Image (cartoon, rainbow, N blue to C red):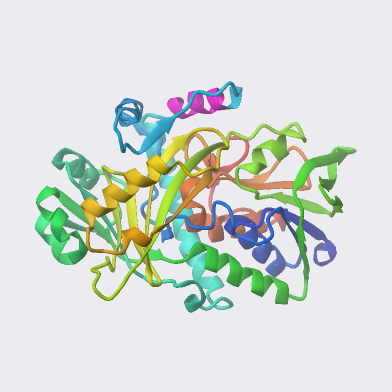
């Protein structure tokens, strides 16, 4: 096998594409990265939540979620907004999502994502040998999920797949563990803390990894051009048509976030992806502020808070509005109000920078990794809000599959044909 001489084109320069490129270089391939933006990590990877939540991987689809979603849609600052589209892909995705909204499927998917999370944690540790943590503000902060409803809290404590390493806390203990929650303490039923979870700057991670890629002896460079179509002949992919011409190779990896959906269709591949639009605030932390040291998720409000470097990252919301990347100022205003109410002294919200990004989600929240009907076209897509968390793990699985080693565990719901 002449694996070391084979050329791979990785389509997508976000965190998933960059990690895929690195693991394939380490596996012996030559790699070219194809990215439409002038800089890597500038779309969904730019200002996401920044949490590396290896043990908190609960799929969006679960029993009771459809009813909750209807309630959220009528809340002024609710976590969900929905706009009906004439696009049949939206309806297919919704029907598949509803089919996964049951406890049995949720348990199966959660168990598989926990396996992927543990692999991702170990894979990140492996990458740390080449990529110093200080370059992307990585901190072993731990993760604290706080609950306002006793009923919801009790259900979370009772979940059978919960980590044995967790700490279950009452409301007072939760506020003592994280003083930034002091004002919220009377409203808390309790919290669940997991050590070993981390926070980091995903965009800085992308830039640091690109630097290592460019220094790798088998890296062939970055082509900054938008991929427009996959060209197939004789049952294989031979090239990618871009706005600047053709890019050829021996293998092709589709890791372009939500853009993967349209590109795959040019090769008659229907990917069950839908863009879940999320928002974030990045607010500076000054000397007078009391920002959280622990990564915090407000479960009922579906909002996370993470100290990343000298800033507080606040991220939340799911807008199902198609491929609209614009910032809805009403959503930003609602997120700011919620942050001020929850952690009023944590950061300078008046100077916060806002962001919106499209997270490419599958109906069951499990990414798609592996082969397609074309022997040289591979997928690493559909990570949803956990792209940073799962990127290293799915990249290592992809490299194993492409080199014929096989996956480290049964992929089940992680494959293209699931």
4 over 59 or under it: above or below: below
On the image, which quarter does residue 81 sit in?
A: top left
Name the spot of residue 205 as percent of width and height, x first. 54, 67
Residue at left offset 66%, top offset 59%: 399
Picture residue at 72% right of the left edge, 58% below the top: 403
Q: Quadrant of residue 54?
A: bottom left
Q: Position of residue 370 (x, y in %)?
A: 65, 47
Q: Is residue 145 left or right of residue 267?
A: left
Quadrant into which the C terminus falls: top right
The secondary structure making up most of the magenta span is helix
Query: In the image as oriented, which residue stretches furthest toward the right?
Result: 234
Expressed as whole percent of the image width and height from the top left, the position of residue 416 reads 62, 39
Q: How many marks?
A: 0
Residue 59 appears in the rendering: no
Front residue of this view, candidates 210 and 113 = 210
In the image, 234 versus 146, the foreground residue is 146
- Residue 255 belongs to the span the image colors magenta: no
Judged left or right of residue 400, residue 153 is: left
Q: The N terminus appears in which quarter of the rendering?
A: bottom right
Taking 72 as reference, is 205 left or right? right
Q: Quadrant of residue 307?
A: bottom left
**Image-based side of 352 in relation to 269, left or right:** left
Q: Residue at x 39, y 37 (%)?
A: 106
Q: Is residue 350 visible?
A: yes
Relative to residue 267, is residue 135 depicted above or below? below
Which residue occupies the foreground of this view, 367 or 174?
174
User: Would you place residue 84 above or below residue 6 in this image?
Assistant: above
Residue closest to the eye, 86 or 32: 86
Query: Magenta residues, as a range?
Result: 90-99
Q: Position of residue 400 (x, y in %)?
A: 65, 58
- At x 18%, y 45%, the residue is 148
Instruction: Tell whether position 95 is magenta.
Output: yes
């Amino acid at each position: 096998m002449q694996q070391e001489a084979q050329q791979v084109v990785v389509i997508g320069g976000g965190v998933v594409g960059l990690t895929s490129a690195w693991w394939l270089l380490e596996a012996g391939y030559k790699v070219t990265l194809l990215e439409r933006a002038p800089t890597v990590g500038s779309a969904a990877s730019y200002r996401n939540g920044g949490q590396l939540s290896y043990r908190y991987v609960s799929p969006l689809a679960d029993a009771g979620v459809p009813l909750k979603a209807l309630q959220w849609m009528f809340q002024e600052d609710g976590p969900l907004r929905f706009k009906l589209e004439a696009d049949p892909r939206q309806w297919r995705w919704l029907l598949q999502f509803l089919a996964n909204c049951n406890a049995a499927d949720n348990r199966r998917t959660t168990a598989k994502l926990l396996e992927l999370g543990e692999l991702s944690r170990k894979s990140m540790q492996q990458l740390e040998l080449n990529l110093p943590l200080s370059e992307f503000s990585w901190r072993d902060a731990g993760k604290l999920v706080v609950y306002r409803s006793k009923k919801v809290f009790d259900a979370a404590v009772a979940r059978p797949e919960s980590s044995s390493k967790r700490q279950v806390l009452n409301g007072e203990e939760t506020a003592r563990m994280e003083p930034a929650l002091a004002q919220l303490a009377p409203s808390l039923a309790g919290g669940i803390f997991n050590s070993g979870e981390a926070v980091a700057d995903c965009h800085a991670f992308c830039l640091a990894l690109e630097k290592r890629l460019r220094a790798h002896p088998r890296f062939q460079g970055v082509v900054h051009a938008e991929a427009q179509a996959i060209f197939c002949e004789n049952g294989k992919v031979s090239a990618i048509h871009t706005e600047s011409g053709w890019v050829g190779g021996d293998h092709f990896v589709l890791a372009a976030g939500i853009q993967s959906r349209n590109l795959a269709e040019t090769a008659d591949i229907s990917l069950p992806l839908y863009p879940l639009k999320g928002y974030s605030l990045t607010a500076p932390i000054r000397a007078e502020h009391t920002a959280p040291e622990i990564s915090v998720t407000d479960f009922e409000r579906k909002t996370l808070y993470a100290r990343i470097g000298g800033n507080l990252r606040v991220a939340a919301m799911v807008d199902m509005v198609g491929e609209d990347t614009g910032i809805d100022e009403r959503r930003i205003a609602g997120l700011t109000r919620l942050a001020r109410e929850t952690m009023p002294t944590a950061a300078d919200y008046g100077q916060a920078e806002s962001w919106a990004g499209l997270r490419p989600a599958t109906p069951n929240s499990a990414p798609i990794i592996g082969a397609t009907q074309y022997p040289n076209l591979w997928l690493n897509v559909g990570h949803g809000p956990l792209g940073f968390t799962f990127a290293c793990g799915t990249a290592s699985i992809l490299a194993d599959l492409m080199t014929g080693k096989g996956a480290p565990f049964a992929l089940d719901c992680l494959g293209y044909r699931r």
